[in-house]
Amino acid sequence: MATLDALFLKFATNKLGQLSSRIVDCLGRLAEDQIWSRDSQNQNAVGNLVLHLCGNVRQWIISGVGGEADARDRDAEFAARGEVSGAELVARLEETMARALEIVRNTTAERLTETVRIQGYEVSVLEAIGHVTEHFAQHTGQIVYATKLLTGADLGYYRHLSKTPAHREKTP
C-alpha cells in the first residue's frame, strides 16, 4: 500500500511532467511571432509565461527545496519581448523541469514537513511543491487557451474521453 507522501510526490511529478509536455506541444504549434503575441501591454505572451514558469520552478523547487542558489530576475520574465526563440524556450523549460522533477522525486517523507524560506515566505517543502504544481497548472491553462486562440486548433488533449459513453460531450 502506498504511503500518503509517496502518493503526493508521484502526483506532483506526474502532473508537472504532463503539463510541461503540453507547453512544449503548444510551443511547437506556434510561430515565433505567435509565441510573443499580445493584444496589449498589460497581457503576457506565451513566451513570457514560459519564462515565468521556469523562474518560478527554479526559485521554489530547485533553489527552495533543492538548496541551489537563487538567481531569479522575475521582472525580466515579464519584460521579454521576443528575444528568446521558441526552440530556446523549449530547451529552458525541459532543462528546468528535468532538474525540478529529479528533486521532487528524491524528496523524502521527512523533508515534506521541513520549513524553507522562499520569496520571503516560510513554507513547508510539501507546500512549496503543492504551490508549484498549482501555479504551473494555472499558467499551462493560459498557454493552452492562447494556443487555441492563436491557431484555432483542437489540441486533442482530451480526445480519449470521447470514446467513453459518459463523456460524449465536447471537452474544452
Image (tube, rainbow, N blue to C red):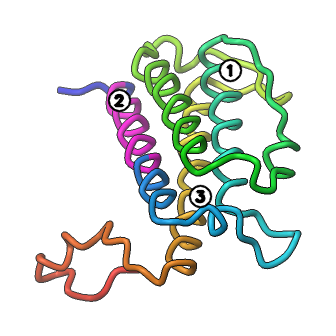
* Kind of residue at badge 3: Gln
Q: In the orientation shown, which residue stands out farthest toward the bottom? A: 169
Residue at the image point whose x is 53% and y is 54% from the top:
137
Q: Relative to 124, is 163 above or below? A: below
Residue contact at pointers 2 and 1, CB within 8 angstroms: no
What type of secondary structure mainly makes up the magenta span? helix
Residue at the image point whose x is 12% and y is 76% from the top:
164
- The crowd level at tag 2 (other Cα within 10 Å; few <14, some 14-19, many 20+) is few
- Quarter the N terminus occupies: top left
Lower sequence index among marks 1 and 3: 1
- Measured in 3D between alpha carbons, the distance from the residue under mark 2 to the one under mark 1, in whole angstroms, is 22 Å
Lower sequence index among marks 2 and 1: 2
- The crowd level at tag 1 (other Cα within 10 Å; few <14, some 14-19, many 20+) is many
Write down the residue under mark 3: 138
Write down the residue under mark 1: 64
> From the viewer's perspective, is the residue at label 2 or at label 3 nearer?
3
The image shows residue 157 at horizontal and vertical percentages of 32, 66
Residue 15 within the segment the image draws in magenta: yes
The image shows residue 18 at horizontal and vertical percentages of 38, 48
- Measured in 3D between alpha carbons, the distance from the residue under mark 2 to the one under mark 3, in whole angstroms, is 24 Å
- The crowd level at tag 3 (other Cα within 10 Å; few <14, some 14-19, many 20+) is few
* Kind of residue at badge 2: Leu
Residue 24 versus residue 117: which sits nearer the camera?
Answer: 24
Q: Taking 84 as reference, is 41 left or right? A: right
Residue 132 within the segment the image draws in magenta: no
Which labelled disc corresponds to residue 4? 2
- Measured in 3D between alpha carbons, the distance from the residue under mark 1 to the one under mark 3, in whole angstroms, is 20 Å
Tag 1 secondary structure: helix
What stretch of residues is rendered in magenta?
6-20
Q: Taking 1 as reference, is 113 left or right? A: right
